Image (cartoon, helix red, strand yellow):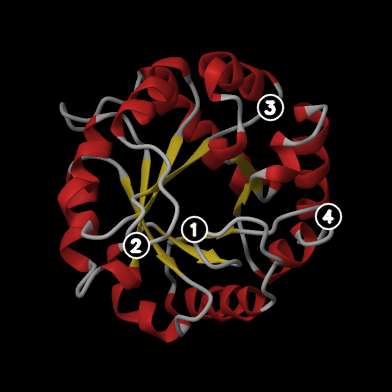
């Protein structure tokens, strides 16, 4: 789907198709999260991650209201879009995401993820994101029953299962995410759904295999990649463990 207001480059568009092909043919893909990268050298970090084999990048937008932490917003997303050739996922941990989600599509986000907990009815926001040419994903926090997402599965392209509480650093992986992933994977098989399964939080060499075995396809990894000395090796090792578990 394309739309003239969607600023994704032609390179990112073709690379989204490449990422999809790799997902379908080889298994889970790791999306490095930029939150811990060196923002003083943002473009260089993006290029370094792409050269390391990252097939997509994950950006955490936090408003200091929906979650305690305040990170970045449209200016940084736009700068990353200019530097990156791979697809971008913008994870909106904000109140009233319906107000700004279309702006992130216009800035070039390929996936816009909004939280179920931030919306009385996610469907109009998911529809708006898709109408502008991006993929719409729905995130659910650890304490949110997975069943609450069921009425909206037909309106989203993916479900992001949080394996830590959003907006807090240094948390341990919450195993409840495994049950949610497995539940959604079974539901997708039963209903013939096409939504992707994603996971974010506490991903390491110890947890990446279990989340993949439970059904995760797009796996967000922050410190496991950014705090490593060798981005390429970190991504390669995580993806190998994930694919080996499926």
Q: Are marks 4 and 1 in contact (CB under 8 Å)?
A: no
Return the residue nearer the eye: 70 or 102: 70
Pointer 4 or 1: first along the chain: 1
Judging from the image, what secondary structure is the residue with disc 3 in? loop
Q: Which sits earlier in the primary sequence, circle 4 or circle 2?
A: 2
Going from the N terminus, do you reach mark 2 or mark 1 first?
2
Say how many tags the image has.
4
Q: Are marks 2 and 1 in contact (CB under 8 Å)?
A: yes
Question: Does residue 174 sit above or below 57 in this rendering?
Answer: below
Disc 2 designates what residue?
Answer: 66
| Whole-number angstrom distance, CA of label 4 to CA of label 1 | 30 Å
On residue 53, the disc is: 3
Tags 3 and 1 touching, CB below 8 Å: no
Dot 3 or dot 1, earlier in sequence? 3
Q: Is residue 164 above or below residue 106?
A: below
Residue at numbered disc 1: 167
Q: Position of residue 109 (x, y in %)?
A: 35, 36
For disc 3, the neighbor class at 10 Å (few under 14, some 14 to 19, many from 20) is some
Q: In percent of the image, x 66 and y 50: which residue is there? A: 28
Q: Residues within 10 Å of mark 4 (few under 14, many from 20)?
A: few
Nearer mark to the viewer, of 4 and 2: 2
Please identify the quadrant where the N terminus is shown: top left
């Amino acid at each position: 789907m394309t739309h003239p207001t969607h600023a994704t480059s032609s390179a990112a568009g073709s690379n989204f198709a490449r990422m999809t092909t790799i997902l379908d043919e080889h298994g889970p893909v790791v999306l490095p999260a930029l939150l811990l990268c060196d923002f003083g050298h943002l473009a260089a970090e993006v290029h370094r991650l792409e050269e390391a084999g990252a097939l997509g990048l994950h950006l955490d937008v936090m408003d200091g209201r929906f979650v305690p932490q305040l990170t970045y917003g449209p200016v940084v997303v736009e700068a990353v879009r200019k530097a990156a050739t791979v697809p971008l996922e913008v994870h909106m941990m904000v109140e009233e995401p319906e107000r700004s989600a279309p702006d992130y599509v216009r800035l070039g986000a390929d996936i816009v993820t909004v939280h179920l907990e931030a919306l009385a009815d996610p469907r109009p926001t998911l529809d708006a994101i898709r109408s502008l040419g991006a993929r719409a994903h729905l995130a659910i926090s650890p304490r949110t029953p997975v069943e609450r997402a069921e009425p909206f599965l037909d309106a989203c392209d993916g479900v992001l299962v949080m394996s830590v509480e959003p907006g807090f650093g240094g948390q341990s992986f919450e195993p409840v995410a495994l049950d949610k992933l497995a539940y959604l994977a079974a539901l997708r098989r039963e209903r013939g759904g096409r939504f992707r399964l994603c996971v974010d939080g506490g991903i390491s060499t110890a947890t990446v295999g279990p989340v993949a075995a439970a059904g995760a396809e797009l796996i967000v990894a922050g410190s496991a990649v950014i705090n490593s000395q060798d981005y390429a090796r970190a991504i390669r090792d995580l993806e190998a463990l994930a694919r080996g578990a499926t």
